């Protein structure tokens, strides 16, 4: 006979539903600000921002996908679109031509510099402002814990019953 599921307590269910609501609503709110102000999606911004912080504003696509926790195919589609807008360029990696690198163009850098203040203001408004330092630390700890649990390398995923 199958083992009874470990049902959530009322307190656990309330926490889960609050997190689910956050997961569904926060990306849309941040997307809306970036689209309105800079014609970028949140994911576009993360791609450009990730390149802006890399040495030489250049990164292998595989490393960028890993940094953004996304599939290489999803990243490739976005990179192609951003390249068509002149915000980055792709090229074979000079150290290993079997890899492709993405490099931020001057136009991409200018857009990240322009978009960053509004994005940070939105993050402050929706997430940071009003939290105490200990709540921010708890938020970071919870987010890191959940991210580790869903990581493809996690060995602690749910087991079939």
Image (cartoon, rainbow, N blue to C red):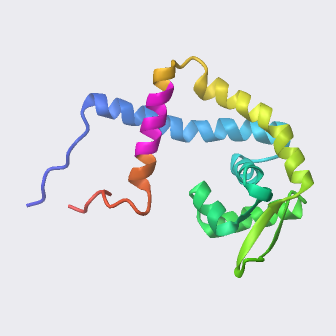
The secondary structure making up most of the magenta span is helix
Q: Nearer the viewer, residue 60 or 7?
A: 60
Residue 19 falls left or right of residue 5: right
Q: Is residue 151 above or below residue 28?
A: below
Counting from the top left corner in percent of width and height, residue 104 is at: 83, 57
The residue under the point 40% across, 44% down is 145
Counting from the top left corner in percent of width and height, residue 64 is at: 66, 61
The residue under the point 20% across, 61% down is 161
Labels in figure, total:
0
Taking the view exactly as shown, the residue that stands out farthest to the left is 1
Residues in magenta, as a range: 136-145
Q: Nearer the viewer, residue 119 or 63?
A: 63
Q: Nearer the viewer, residue 86 or 104?
A: 104
Q: Residue 58 colored magenta?
A: no
Q: Residue 141 colored magenta?
A: yes
The residue under the point 47% across, 23% down is 135
Quadrant in which residue 88 is drawn: bottom right
Quadrant in which residue 65 is drawn: bottom right
Residue 74 falls left or right of residue 100: left
Counting from the top left corner in percent of width and height, residue 123 is at: 66, 31
The residue under the point 75% across, 56% down is 55
* Quarter the N terminus occupies: bottom left
Residue 46 falls left or right of residue 136: right
Quadrant in which residue 70 is drawn: bottom right
Counting from the top left corner in percent of width and height, residue 99 is at: 69, 77
Q: Is residue 97 above or below residue 1?
A: below
């Amino acid at each position: 006979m199958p083992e009874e599921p470990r049902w959530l307590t009322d307190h656990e269910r309330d926490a889960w539903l609050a997190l689910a609501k956050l997961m569904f609503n926060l990306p849309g709110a941040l997307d809306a600000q970036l689209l309105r102000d800079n014609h970028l999606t949140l994911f576009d911004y993360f791609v450009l921002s990730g390149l802006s912080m890399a040495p030489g504003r250049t990164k292998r696509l595989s490393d960028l996908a890993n940094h953004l926790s996304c599939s290489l195919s999803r990243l490739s589609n976005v990179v192609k679109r951003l390249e068509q807008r002149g915000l980055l360029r792709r090229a074979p990696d000079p150290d290993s031509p079997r890899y492709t690198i993405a490099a931020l163009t001057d136009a991409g850098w200018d857009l990240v510099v322009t978009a960053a203040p509004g994005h940070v203001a939105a993050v402050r408004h929706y997430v940071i402002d009003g939290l105490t330092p200990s709540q921010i630390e708890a938020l970071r700890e919870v987010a890191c814990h959940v991210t580790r649990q869903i990581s493809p390398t996690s060995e602690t995923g749910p087991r079939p019953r």
